Amino acid sequence: MNFDVSEAARATALAHLAAACRSAGEIPGLPASLPRRPIKRVGVVGAGTMGGGIAMNYANAGIPTIIVETSREALDRGLGIVRKNYEASVAKGKLAAEECAQRMARLTGTLDYADLADCDLVIEAVFENMDIKKQVCARLGEVCKPGAIIASNTSTLDVDVLGAASGRPADFLGMHFFSPANVMRLLEVVRGAQTAPEVLASVMDNAKAIGKIAVVSGVCYGFIGNRMLEGYLRESEFLMLEGVPPARIDAAIQSLGLPMGPCRMIDMAGVDVAAKVVIERDKAGGLPPDPSYRVVVRKLLELGRFGQKTGAGYYRYEGRNALPDPAVDAICADLAAQYRIARRDAVSDEEIIERCLYPLINEGAKILEEGIAYRPGDIDVVWVYAYAFPDFRGGPMHMADTLGPAAITDGLARYAQQRGDAFGYWTAAGLLSRLVAERKRFADLTSK
């Protein structure tokens, strides 16, 4: 497969992406005249990395924000990190010292949930654990004023379950910020089964107020972005088990124009974070019955190789420099033997790209088929602005149109034959097969 992009194709991709950004805010069934709930005061539960970053968005936009923590130590640490972030911007000349002081003045820390009673919007940003989040959401349902919007920053968990826990599902939705939350432009707004239309409309407007590009997702594991990411990470791990070093996988993916490949990405985000997502999903019964599924990241967690922050993950680190680590090859060889996965001497860059990319695109087709995303362009916006998919390719669904849906289905069938398809990893989405049969592209689909 030729993955080169001509200048004309680049221009077409960029035009597609600009149009997709404009249409992302157009929600079927939500009239422009629908009343909005005012959001003039915001609460954030959790002063960690995500909570602090979320609070900065609102302070930057001039909106008073209350941050709740469980201990004075955690609260002081979180507010201290926010202050350091602002002071770093002042030192670089990107922010005036007076503005820094004004933004910090808009942030108030507290240990008492009752102080959230006057907030118009409260976002929980606690640890990604269903039981913990349910407890927090239940508490918010008790203390928030009538008409307040309650949101979860979950990246994977069931928003309907959390909404039910709050006791106010009509007032509830997901607001999935991406890390660092004060920098990343994308916001996935997750519409629950009982989310009131005016709540969705209010949050979409609020996203613009804090400078975000918002895309609506339905409720499913991982929503749009992280659900599609799963197949990409799965195949990167299987390639490692077959003997392909992390550096080769990353280099092949970077040749498409992404700033980093899957291994480096997880090392930066935290191997421990990535592994715990897999473990939580396993506990919930959401993994395929494949004993070799994502065993590499789980093994690295077990060994304490949490990524860049511990100096070792898929790579070893000297400062921020990622260096190949023979220990990882040995780990993968041992796991391959344990799970009877054949090692191979030669895997082409083309295979690496196809095996990582085709499942990602196929999952995007399933998301559209299920109505999780309204439009193919919405998926492209998520992947360009949250996962740094190259804008000159227009996003994964636009890229699929460029390659041709038939090329994707042919590739999936080829890998199903070569590798087997016991767990449905290579089964083409019904929508993708239909596009091929009807000689259409994703661009031919209309919003629902």
Image (cartoon, rainbow, N blue to C red):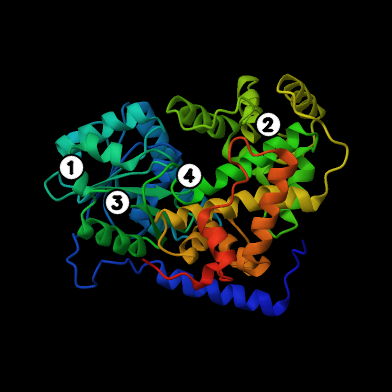
Dot 1 or dot 3: first in sequence order is 3
Question: Helix, strand, or loop for circle 4?
Answer: helix
Whether residue 320 is visible, yes or no, is yes
Instruction: Quote the CA–CA distance across marks 3 and 4.
Output: 16 Å
Dot 4 or dot 1: first in sequence order is 4
Residues under numbered marks 3 and 4 in contact, where contact means CB atoms less than 8 Å apart? no
Question: Helix, strand, or loop for circle 1?
Answer: loop
Instruction: Quote the CA–CA distance across marks 4 and 2.
Output: 27 Å
Within 10 Å of the Cα at label 1, are there few (<14), some (14-19), or many (20+) other Cα atoms? many
The residue under label 4 is which amino acid type? Lys
The residue positioned farthest toward the right in the image shown: 345
Say above or below: 385 vs 134.
below
Which residue lies under the disc numbered 2? 313
Is residue 288 left or right of 351 when viewed as pictured? left
Q: Nearer the viewer, residue 408 or 304?
A: 408
The residue positioned farthest toward the left in the image shown: 146
The residue under label 1 is which amino acid type? Arg
Within 10 Å of the Cα at label 2, are there few (<14), some (14-19), or many (20+) other Cα atoms? many
The residue under label 3 is which amino acid type? Arg
Which residue lies under the disc numbered 3? 106
Which residue lies under the disc numbered 1? 168
Identify which residue is drawn at 66% across, 44% down: 262
Identify which residue is drawn at 54% across, 48% down: 228
Say above or below: 320 vs 27.
above
Which residue lies under the disc numbered 4? 84
Is residue 160 left or right of 179 when viewed as pictured? left
Identify which residue is drawn at 77% across, 21% down: 337
Instruction: Quote the CA–CA distance across marks 4 and 1.
Output: 36 Å
The x, y position of residue 156, in whole percent, is 43, 40
Question: Helix, strand, or loop for circle 2?
Answer: loop
The label nearer to you, 2 versus 1, is: 1
